[in-house]
Each structure stands twice: as structure tokens, then as C-alpha cells.
């Protein structure tokens, strides 16, 4: 790789490293490093099929969990939940009568 085709930041790095010490590296060191970098940059990047499958697997699991949660929340919103047990018909009748009696007493005291 020649100096003209090298990116500007790599050229600056090379200049800073060159000015840092007086010791001279081997003559062919630069050419070997630049050839190795060029080979690595030319090599296509491949992702491992196992890693890609692993990501897809976890994405599918997360989507499944979200779907199950949404469906359960949908059905839960259609039901009425209470911490108290449902009142019986007899209990409802007696409570209504007690409320009517209280209202009648209040009306009598306010007149």
C-alpha cells in the first residue's frame, strides 16, 4: 500500500509513531503491516451462521412473549376482578333495603 492510497488518519498515525522514537524498525516492517491490513480489509466480513441463528431465535422468543402478554391482557381487561367475593342476590336485597331505610331516616330528620 503506497502513501497516496492510504487514508489521512493512518498517515497521521504513521507520522506520529515515526516522530515518537529514534529507534528505526526493520526496513520491510511497514510494507508487511500495510500488506496485512490490505488483506484484512479486502476479506469479506461474514457472520457466523450460529450467531445469526441465535439472534433470530431470541428475537422470536421475545416476540412470542409479547404476543402472549398482549393476549392475556386483552382477555383480562374483559373480566371484572375484585378482591371481595361476589354478593348473593339475598345479600344485595338486604343491602338495598338498609340503604333505603337510612335515606328515609335522613329525609325525616332534615324536614
Image (tube, rainbow, N blue to C red):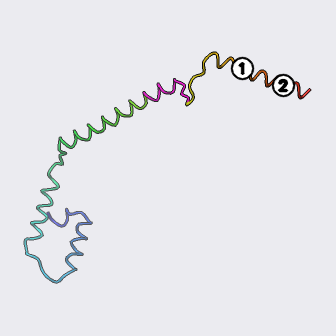
Q: Which mark is residue 105?
A: 2
Give the residue displayed 69% in from the left and 19% down from the top: 94
Q: What is the count of numbered marks?
A: 2
**Dot 1: within a 10 Å radius of its alpha carbon, few (fewer than 14), some, or many (20 or more) residues?**
few
Q: Is residue 80 magenta?
A: yes
Distance from Cα at disc 1 to Cα at disc 2? 14 Å
> As displayed, is residue 72 above or below residue 3?
above
Q: Quadrant of the C terminus?
A: top right
Q: Which mark is residue 70?
A: none
**Residue 98 at what x, y percent from top left?**
74, 22
**Residue 85 at what x, y percent from top left?**
56, 25
In this picture, residue 82 sits left or right of residue 98: left
58 and 46: which one is in front?
Answer: 58
**Residue 55 at what x, y percent from top left?**
26, 41
Outermost residue on the bottom side: it is 22
> As displayed, is residue 24 above or below residue 55?
below
Quarter of image, res 95: top right
Region in magenta: 71-82
The residue identified by callout 1 is: 96
Give the residue displayed 14% in from the left and 64% down from the top: 34
Label whose residue precedes the other's in the sequence (1 or 2): 1
Amino acid at each position: 500500500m503506497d502513501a497516496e492510497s492510504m487514508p489521512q488518519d493512518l498517515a497521521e498515525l504513521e507520522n506520529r509513531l515515526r516522530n515518537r522514537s529514534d529507534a528505526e524498525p526493520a526496513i520491510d516492517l511497514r510494507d508487511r503491516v500495510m500488506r496485512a491490513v490490505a488483506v484484512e480489509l479486502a476479506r469479506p466480513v461474514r457472520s457466523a451462521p450460529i450467531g445469526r441463528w441465535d439472534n433470530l431465535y431470541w428475537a422470536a422468543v421475545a416476540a412470542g412473549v409479547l404476543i402472549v402478554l398482549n393476549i392475556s391482557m386483552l382477555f383480562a381487561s374483559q373480566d371484572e376482578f375484585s378482591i371481595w367475593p361476589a354478593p348473593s342476590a339475598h345479600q344485595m336485597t338486604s343491602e338495598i333495603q338498609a340503604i333505603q331505610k337510612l335515606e328515609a331516616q335522613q329525609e325525616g330528620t332534615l324536614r
